[in-house]
């Protein structure tokens, strides 16, 4: 079955100033950028919805009221800063320096291959994606005392796992088979679109978002991503695109993720998710990463951690504790007060505990839920690998 249809109307996009990465022409100075019955796996299976069934990875240590949780952050734009803004690969500054990751007790960080819409007169290429992936490798190579690539096996104790993702994959419409080698190389999450409509999908902030969703190429691309063990990221996708993705995810029994989005019911912004979308993500076994960028957290005043906690509580109410994580958007947009950089992430754990979440629930939100969806990807790739060259 197709699952629930998306009925929420889109909010009009705010041009730039929305916490996303604008073109150089737009700015040169500021970087852009409980479980309800319906969300349980049992009820999802009964209704025909897809469920990511891989078992969660074991916790690194039993959670307690005093142990600080280790975070896995689903979206940190440091590669964009290094590739396009001239920041050294050693990352001596920014929201997610190695010192900040260490002080924040990070367990993992997802570095996106963000392919800017504006490259080459709005014609970015797959070669650009290759070069940005090389940038991620350079960051890891320059910080081996802290970082360990997810693609290179188990992470040594005390180090931070560096995952890779793609954000804005429109250029792959020219040859969708090219996504295979990126996933084989270690990409976990794949976002077909960014700020503007692409050849794969309309964007939440695009011009044609009410008329269409995934293109024919986009549907084939999403299917190929899942076939190869990647996971489609809907954080920038239009509501129509999200709706088109649902039956594809169901076909592959795959999770849908939104690596860095909040709840539209709390803050009315096109980049945030409707309650219906949150329910669908939960039914697929997916995860929504809380975004720290101010305009996605609140439309009023100077938002802080308490405002972000409102999003967390709402997502938990609608989707369940197993379907919320962290996707800070560090190094891509200005974070809210109290979470100014990665070293402060413990303050979010404290605020969540004060809001009534148990230590175990905070542990899930900080890392275990993301581990579950990554395990789906790893299991899928392992199965493909065991099939041999003829797959």
Image: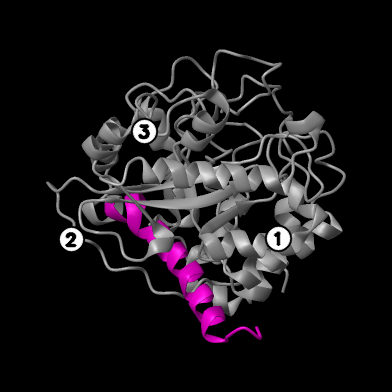
Q: Do the residues labelled 2 and 1 touch (CB within 8 Å)?
A: no
State the residue position of label 2. Answer: 61
Residue 159 position, x and y percent, is 26, 51
- Looking at marks 2 and 1 on the same chain, the residue that comes earlier in the sequence is marked by 2
In this rendered view, identify the residue nearer to me: 60 or 256. 60
Residue 179 position, x and y percent, is 67, 60
Its colouring scheme is one colour
Q: Do the residues labelled 3 and 2 touch (CB within 8 Å)?
A: no
- Looking at marks 3 and 2 on the same chain, the residue that comes earlier in the sequence is marked by 2
Location of the C terminus (image quadrant): bottom right
How many angstroms separate mark 3 from mark 2 (CA)? 30 Å
Q: Is 366 part of what is drawn in magenta? A: yes
Dot 2 alpha-carbon crowd within 10 angstroms: few under 14, some 14 to 19, many 20 or more: few
On residue 178, the disc is: 1
Dot 1 alpha-carbon crowd within 10 angstroms: few under 14, some 14 to 19, many 20 or more: few
Q: Quadrant of residue 197?
A: top right
In this rendered view, identify the residue nearer to me: 214 or 83. 83
Secondary structure mainly formed by the magenta segment: helix
Closer to us: mark 2 or mark 1? 1
- Looking at marks 3 and 1 on the same chain, the residue that comes earlier in the sequence is marked by 3
Residue 161 seen: yes
Report the span colored magenta.
363-391
Looking at the image, residue 267 sits to the left or right of residue 365; the answer is right
Q: Which residue is drawn at 28% across and 32% down?
A: 100
On residue 342, the disc is: none
Q: Please count the marks in the image.
A: 3
Looking at the image, residue 232 sits to the left or right of residue 323; the answer is right
Closer to us: mark 3 or mark 2? 3
On residue 90, the disc is: 3
Residue 367 position, x and y percent, is 34, 54
Vertical relation: 40 (above or below) 67: below
Vertical relation: 74 (above or below) 348: below
């Amino acid at each position: 079955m197709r699952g629930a249809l998306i009925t929420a109307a889109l909010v009009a996009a705010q041009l730039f100033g929305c916490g996303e990465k604008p073109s150089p022409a737009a700015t040169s100075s500021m970087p852009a950028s409980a479980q309800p019955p319906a969300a349980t796996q049992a009820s999802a299976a009964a209704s025909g919805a897809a469920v990511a069934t891989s078992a969660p990875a074991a916790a690194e240590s039993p959670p307690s009221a005093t142990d600080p949780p280790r975070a896995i952050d689903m979206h940190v734009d440091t590669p964009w800063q290094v590739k396009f803004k001239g920041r050294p690969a050693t990352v001596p500054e920014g929201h997610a320096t190695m010192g900040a990751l260490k002080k924040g007790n990070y367990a993992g960080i997802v570095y996106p291959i963000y392919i800017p819409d504006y490259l080459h007169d709005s014609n970015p290429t797959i070669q650009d994606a290759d070069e940005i992936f090389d940038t991620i490798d350079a960051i890891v190579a320059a910080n081996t005392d802290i970082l360990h690539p997810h693609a290179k096996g188990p992470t040594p104790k005390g180090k931070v796992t560096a995952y890779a993702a793609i954000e804005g994959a429109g250029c792959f419409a020219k040859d969708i088979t090219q996504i295979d080698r990126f996933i084989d190389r270690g990409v976990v999450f794949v976002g077909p679109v960014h700020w503007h409509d692409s050849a794969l999908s309309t964007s939440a902030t695009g011009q044609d978002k009410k008329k269409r969703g995934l293109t024919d190429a986009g549907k084939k691309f999403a299917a190929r991503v899942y076939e190869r063990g990647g996971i489609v990221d809907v954080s920038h996708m239009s509501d129509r695109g999200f709706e088109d993705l649902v039956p594809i995810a169901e076909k592959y029994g795959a999770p849908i993720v939104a690596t860095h989005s909040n709840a539209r019911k709390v803050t009315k912004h096109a980049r945030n998710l409707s309650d219906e979308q949150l329910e669908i993500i939960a039914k697929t076994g997916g995860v929504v990463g809380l975004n720290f960028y101010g305009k996605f957290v609140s439309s009023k005043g100077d938002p802080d951690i308490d405002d972000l906690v409102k999003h967390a509580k709402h997502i938990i109410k609608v989707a369940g504790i197993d379907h919320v994580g962290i996707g800070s958007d560090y190094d891509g947009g200005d974070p809210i007060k109290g979470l100014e950089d990665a070293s402060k992430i413990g303050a979010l754990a404290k605020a969540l505990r004060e809001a009534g979440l148990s230590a175990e629930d905070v542990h899930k939100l900080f890392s275990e839920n993301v581990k579950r969806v990554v395990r789906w990807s790893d299991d899928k790739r392992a199965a493909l690998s065991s099939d041999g060259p003829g797959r």
